[in-house]
Amino acid sequence: MKADSNIFRIADGTSPMTFANEREAVSAPPALMKFEPRHVPGALKLSQEMSWPYRREDWEFAAMLGQGLVLERDSKVIGTAMWWPYGQSHASVGMIIVTATEQGRGYGAWLFDSLLEATQGRDVLLSSTEEGLALYKRRGFVECGTIVQHQSILAAAATQGQVFDGIRPVTVSDLPAIQAIDCRATGMDRAPMVAALVKAGHVVIAESKGRAVGYSIARRFGRGYVVGPCAAESVDDAKRLILDQLSRLRGEFVRIDVHEEYGLSDWLEGLGLERVNQVTAMVKGQRPVSDGIASMYALANQSFG
């Protein structure tokens, strides 16, 4: 690799994207435009090329919740980049791909810099593989944690005989409480995304003395199901919320992405959910701060944060 080459990779995939010399002038560039519904089939092909597990429905859901950019040449999608606004203060970015035949021409850097500009001055979160760290640091991102990916086909014995006191299914009237817990746990206004995730998945709430102290969502994603988000006021509540979701997913392929700092990885491995990967959480600007009581234990996915 040349000395001025860079590996540029947003997490949630398995193959790196190489961009040789970010500053190299690009001849005959493709058109850069806003991501629209018509771009979904092309975006899906790109993610399949990278061996990412997204379904068409996952792309449609992500595009519905956020905004994106596309590089297009002759009506063919050759690059994508997405971002999701969390109020006026924060945003997360992900799903950045450039097709293999167009890599090394500076298109990835062009996409990413345009994406940062589109976030309109918000503090930006992302998940990075080790290969991308240097590039993101040059753009002002700093490390703020580790996210561990667990997945496997869930054995029937994983949650057999478990009792989940204080856990109940969600009702329509619970949405404001769930959104409030999410805001307290993340330090960000993610109300529209939380509402969409609640609508898309199976949701349970943890209660203590008649008060909601946590929630979790399980929904179809990728190869099977993802359990997350899961926010709670204690690690014990988080475990009970996750176990309740897993009790309905025996025999299914399950993925959970958790913040390493809360110590759930060994516990998940004990349930048969193998630790398969880890990425670095990064932020450009001010890191969001929780209320110090509620925490976000499991993510909706690495792109959403």
Image: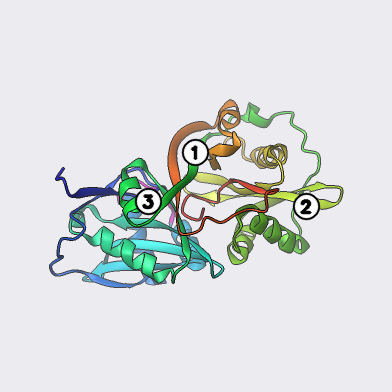
User: Where, by quadrant of the figure, is residue 83 drawn?
Assistant: bottom left
Mark 1, residue position: 148
Q: Secondary structure at mark 2?
A: strand
> Which residue is at 57% across, 28% downward?
266
The verdict on residue 52 being magenta is yes
What x and y, as percent, mark residue 73?
22, 69
User: Where, by quadrant of the figure, is residue 32 drawn?
Assistant: bottom left
Report the magenta residues as a range: 49-55
Q: Amino acid at mark 2?
A: Ala
Mark 2, residue position: 212
The disc, 3 or 1, on the residue closer to the chain's N-terminal end is: 3
Q: Circle 1: is it few (<14), some (14-19), or many (20+) Cα within 10 Å?
A: many
What x and y, as percent, mark residue 223?
47, 44
In the rendered view, tell whether residue 265 sits above or below residue 101: above
Q: CA distance from mark 1 to mark 2?
A: 27 Å
What x and y, as percent, mark residue 64?
50, 67
In the rendered view, tell whether residue 152 sits above or below residue 134: above
Instruction: Tell which of 233 and 134 is nearer to you.
Output: 134
Q: Secondary structure at mark 1?
A: strand
> Which residue is at 56% across, 38% downward?
261
The disc, 1 or 2, on the residue closer to the chain's N-terminal end is: 1
Q: Which mark is residue 10?
A: 3
User: Where, by quadrant of the figure, is residue 118 drawn?
Assistant: bottom left
